[in-house]
Image (cartoon, grey):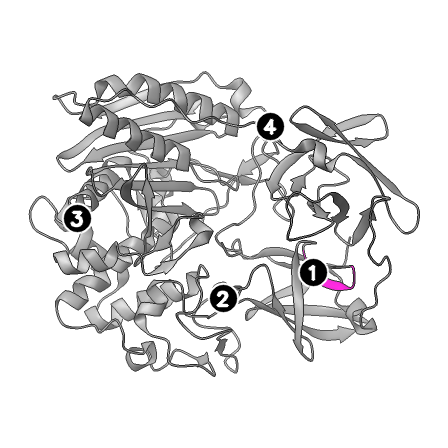
Amino acid sequence: MNRREFLGAGVATGVAASRNFSALETFAESSATYKSIYKPLDQFVEQYLHAMNAPGLTLVLADRDGVQRVVTYGFSDFDQKIGVKPEHLFQIGSISKSFLAICLLQMRDEGKLDLHKPITSYLPWFRIDSAFEPITVHHLLTHSSGLPGIPPVFLSDPSLKHRAAYAPGKLFHYNNTAFEALGHLLMTLDGGLLPDIYRKRIFGPLGMNNSEPTITLENRDRTAKNYSAFQNDRPFPRFGRLSEAPAIISSDAAGCIAATPQDMGLYVQMIARHGEGLKARLLSEESFGLFSQAHIKAEEFGPTASYGYGIATDTLDGHKIVRHTGGMISFASSMHVDLDEGVGAFASINAMQGYRPNPVAQYAIQLMRAQRSGKTLPVAPTIRAATHIENAADFAGTYYSIDGRALNFLAEGDNLFLARKDQKIALEASGDGVFVAPDTYFSRFSLAFGRADAKDPKSAVVEVGWGSDWFVKAEYKGPKTFDYPKEWNAYLGHYRNEDNWIGSIRITTRKGVLMVDGATPLEAEKDRLFRMRSEEADTEWIEFHDIVNGLAMRIKLSGEDLWRVLAP
């Protein structure tokens, strides 16, 4: 996912340890169709919140027949031990994209929108710089436009345009900018403002009377208290420190809805009914088919996932499902709907800790499905500790830098430790060969290990990087010195924008490659412009500006400004 979607955060020290766990059930159908699944589900959620160190969670189960259960767990305010309440609003983040897609498909049903028409034919003011064929509404809806996904639609510099990195339709790269633009398309076609359109087209017809189409300060008292990282300029350990998050205002169609679980149950029910509300269809059968169709492979959502229109599509136990996650400054959400069985769930946590509660939503629909078919209830998923590393021994050993410094890693079963002075620091897995060290000295960057053959996951681990530092084992056979243009030295350092969605970037160099946060390579394109290369589909770019006394004072990140921090 892109930088806005994976906004970094930490978790609160001692939250789980001090919690007296409780589940507050506020709604259950009298038919009690699913009553036998509630106990194993509640037990799993309790284990999940403790293991993930989350403050609280809200959950709704629904099927084609209605909202079957609303239940809340843990705390809205974990300092005062005030529980999450069913009337609390939770910001659903990018699940909002499916609302936008449904509204645009309604416009298609009304003959007002051609999904394969260039977006600039509807929004001539949308500044795009592309050497490829026109970008259509379809490309924006499927995250395949090739445009950057970080900046706002309206760039602060009027001379800049959104630069296409490759031909539209070629690759999937998650894109918030695309959906912000689609929000403007909806308002142009419908002739109103986004909040009014959502209320008219979705909230009203479904009876979602307690939710809000945009996030404003007027509704802060109704919103669950929420948390984000105490230090938001670095990787987060699972048991790091949280602080109450700042209030935000969001009317950006990429993620602007705040909802109660009961209302999200009504939305899940509509999807389970293939676009049909209790009073009338929201979408024609044909448009719902387009909504839930696998238009493009989307491995960012998982190895078997594809993307429809504003929703991911996948299979689970042989059933077709649609699903999406939502990440906000201080909320993390997940929605799963089984289209074959007609059951679904929505879950949301009131903190941003770098993960989404997918296991909760997935296990919920698996339980519902088993109950409906009279099968044995499935065993709860295994919840791994943050320090569980199955192949820990691969990374053990001593690594040396060119100047003689050493890093020593110890493997003990499924745990990997960094031995530092008289301490053993348990590392947390953060990706394939990437680990977070919950230690003050090592907190600014992740530790990234490399194998002798990058294409062979069974080859020996022979190197590790941390920021600009690089260490190798005796078995390492490659070059040990690397050249890079001397002007790059002006670019190294910490850059910051206090916009909550942007935050910090640290530019480093390792093995002759310029990098973002010691993790994402930068590829020189021209002058001071570099492309980010986290993957082939990456569309983001960085440009360095204002060289003063040998240091760049400002960078542009896909059009957004960050300024040098004159401190370490």
| Within-10-Å neighbours for mark 1: few <14, some 14–19, many 20+ | many
Mark on residue 151? 2
Q: Toward the viewer: 390 or 2? A: 390
Picture residue at 25% right of the left edge, 32% below the top:
61
Using residue 85 as the reference point, say whether residue 439 is left or right of it. right
Are dots 4 and 3 in contact, CB under 8 Å? no
Where is residue 493 shown, x and y percent of the image? 75, 60
Q: Toward the viewer: 51 or 183? A: 51
Q: Label 3, on which residue? A: 274
State the CA–CA distance, disc 1 to disc 3: 45 Å
Disc nearest the viewer among 1 and 2: 1
| Within-10-Å neighbours for mark 2: few <14, some 14–19, many 20+ | many
Q: Label 4, on which residue? A: 13
Are dots 2 and 3 in contact, CB under 8 Å? no
Q: Callout 1, which amino acid?
A: Met
- Give the quarter of the image for residue 27: top left
Where is residue 365 shown, x and y percent of the image? 29, 32
Tag 3's secondary structure? Answer: loop
Q: Earlier in the sequence, mark 2 or mark 3?
A: 2
State the CA–CA distance, disc 4 to disc 2: 33 Å
Q: Label 1, on which residue? A: 515
Disc nearest the viewer among 4 and 3: 3
Disc nearest the viewer among 1 and 4: 1
Disc nearest the viewer among 2 and 3: 3
Which residues, given as a range, are shown in magenta?
A: 511-516
- Give the quarter of the image for residue 506: bottom right
Q: Callout 4, which amino acid?
A: Thr
Are dots 1 and 3 in contact, CB under 8 Å? no
State the CA–CA distance, disc 1 to disc 4: 31 Å
Q: Earlier in the sequence, mark 1 or mark 2?
A: 2
